[in-house]
Amino acid sequence: MKKSSLLIILLLMAAAPALAIGQEKQTPEKSEFSFYIDPIAGAEHAVFELTLQNHGDGDLVFEFPTSQKYEIIVRDGQRNKIYQFSEDKAFAQAFEKLALKPHETMKWRESWDYKKAGTRVKEGEYTVNAQLKAVSVNGKPVPDKQQLTDQKQMYIPGENPVFKGIQAEGERGSYKISGEARPIGGKFFYTVEDGHNQLIAETEVVPQSKYPKWHPFSLDVTIPENKLPQNGSLILNLYERSKEGEIIHTYPVLLERFNQNK
């Protein structure tokens, strides 16, 4: 039992810098709506989840000056702009409206490959700013402009020398994970956890080739539905072990997010 608990703690510590998931912005009780961004920093790219929620009992109509609904900007520790969603994109120059019914939620997803001018950015802490580009709600200007913006921190990991091109598909406990691996020690391992409990214990995988040659692999993972979290994230951790048995080259993979409040 102690060894299992220690493994969970070590995996969480190893995965923390490589898979950062933002927290929902706190919304004032009297606010009619909220807008926020959740940046999910994976090993090879970031996913930006944007959410617009109507908290009231009446319809809300958001008006935009163009077809662009939102902006996302990522800055480094020196406040240099590293990524901007709208860069090199064309938007229709005409007013558009977006209607939300009472308690309705609208979500968008965008991704970024960590590259600026073709080169991957350095590992480290970055700031993610999101802005809803609406100019009015129900025909009136928004009195508090902070309702239209959100800011989160995101830690971008360094490149992983052992795993690349990892993809995950599936839902509700049935998942397929594929990609390429070149374990230096000739084998790698994986576990699945939800941030609190380990749902699949350490499992060994021996690919057909060794470092430095890349070789494709595929994993089928099944978790009973009654073991899935009600709220939280289901994460598969790929990793190697050093000659001393330490966990190295961790590559966390987000399988699915569960949140009944969104």
Image: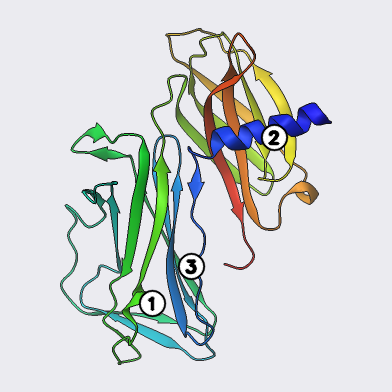
Q: Is residue 176 visible?
A: no
Residue corresponding to mark 1? 147
Of 50 and 146, the residue lying toward us: 146
Q: Which residue type carries mark 2?
A: Ile
* Amino acid, disc 3: Lys
Q: Circle 2 sits in a helix, a strand or a loop, which is it?
A: helix
| Percent x, y of residue 207 | 57, 13
- Image quarter where the N terminus lies is top right
Relative to 50, is 171 above or below?
A: above
Mark 3 falls on what kind of element? loop
- Label 3: few (<14), some or many (≥20) within 10 Å? some
Above or below for 72 versus 97: above
The residue positioned 21% from the left and 77% from the top of the image is: 65
The residue under label 1 is which amino acid type?
Answer: Gln
Q: Mark 2 vs mark 1: which is more N-terminal?
A: 2
Question: How far separated are the C-alphas under marks 3 and 1?
Answer: 10 Å
Residue 25, numbered label: 3
Q: Image quadrant of residue 143? A: bottom left
Labels 3 and 1: the sequence-earlier one? 3
Above-or-below relation of 178 to 21: above
Cβ–Cβ below 8 Å for labels 3 and 1?
no
Whether residue 30 is visible, yes or no, is: yes
Mark nearer the N terminus (2 vs 3) = 2
- Answer left or right for 91 relative to 77: left
Cα distance in 3D space between marks 2 and 3: 28 Å
Q: Which numbered disc covers residue 8? A: 2
Scheme of colours in the image: rainbow
C-alpha separation, residue under disc 2 versus residue under disc 1: 38 Å
